[in-house]
Image: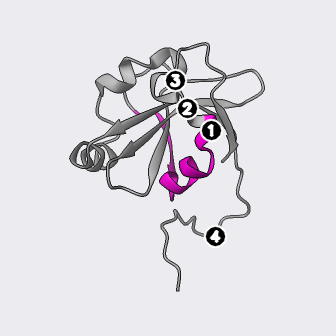
Amino acid sequence: MLKTKAIFERKTYDFQPRDCVIEKIIELTSQQYDAFSKNMLDDYDFIQNNIDLMYCDRQGVYHCLLVVGEDRPDGILVESEGSSYARYAAFLPNACDFLAAHQEQTQGLHDAEPESAGMKMNL
């Protein structure tokens, strides 16, 4: 038996995945991550401080933060669209495994600059 987490849509006609680029990885403590994941509409300094990294470009690609927590397998993609809260968010199950599989690409994303190419993925 395999276990994971997912968000289920009731009677969905189809899924509409979006391309996104992870511009920066924000690592929180376990307690901070748990609080954030339950209160994503609150304002956060780490979102405000990285506001220039999050936007939707002309091709419809979301440029976002990946928020992870110590000892937490999953993550949350955040595109604040100019706000200091998670206006757009996507649950990323097994984010730690995803990051480990793309370790070479993630080097430097913890301290990414706005001009960083980031890491593209399909959501």
Q: Write down the quadrant of residue 85 in the picture.
A: top left
Q: Are marks 4 and 1 in contact (CB under 8 Å)?
A: no
Question: In the rendered structure, which amino acid carries the disc numbered 3?
Answer: Glu
Q: Which mark is residue 104?
A: 1
Residue 75 visible here: yes
Question: In the rendered structure, which amino acid carries the disc numbered 1?
Answer: Glu
Q: Are marks 1 and 3 in contact (CB under 8 Å)?
A: no
The percent position of residue 82, horizontal first and vertical second, equals 47, 18
Q: CA distance from mark 4 to mark 2?
A: 40 Å
Q: CA distance from mark 3 to mark 2?
A: 25 Å
Disc 4, SS: loop
Disc 3, SS: loop
Q: Write down the quadrant of residue 47 in the picture.
A: top left
Position of 4 with respect to 47 (left or right) is: right
Residue at screen point 24% across, 46% down: 35
Residue at screen point 46% across, 29% down: 110
- The magenta stretch spans which residues? 86-105
Q: Which mark is residue 11?
A: 4
Residue 84 visible here: no
Is 98 in the magenta? yes
Disc 2, SS: loop
In front of the other: 102 or 93? 102
Question: In the rendered structure, which amino acid carries the disc numbered 2?
Answer: Gln
Q: CA distance from mark 1 to mark 3?
A: 28 Å
Question: In the rendered structure, which amino acid carries the disc numbered 4?
Answer: Lys
Residue at screen point 37% across, 19% down: 48
Q: CA distance from mark 4 to mark 1?
A: 39 Å
Q: Earlier in the sequence, mark 4 or mark 2?
A: 4
Q: Which mark is residue 107?
A: 2
Which residue in the structure is indicated by mark 3? 81
Circle count: 4
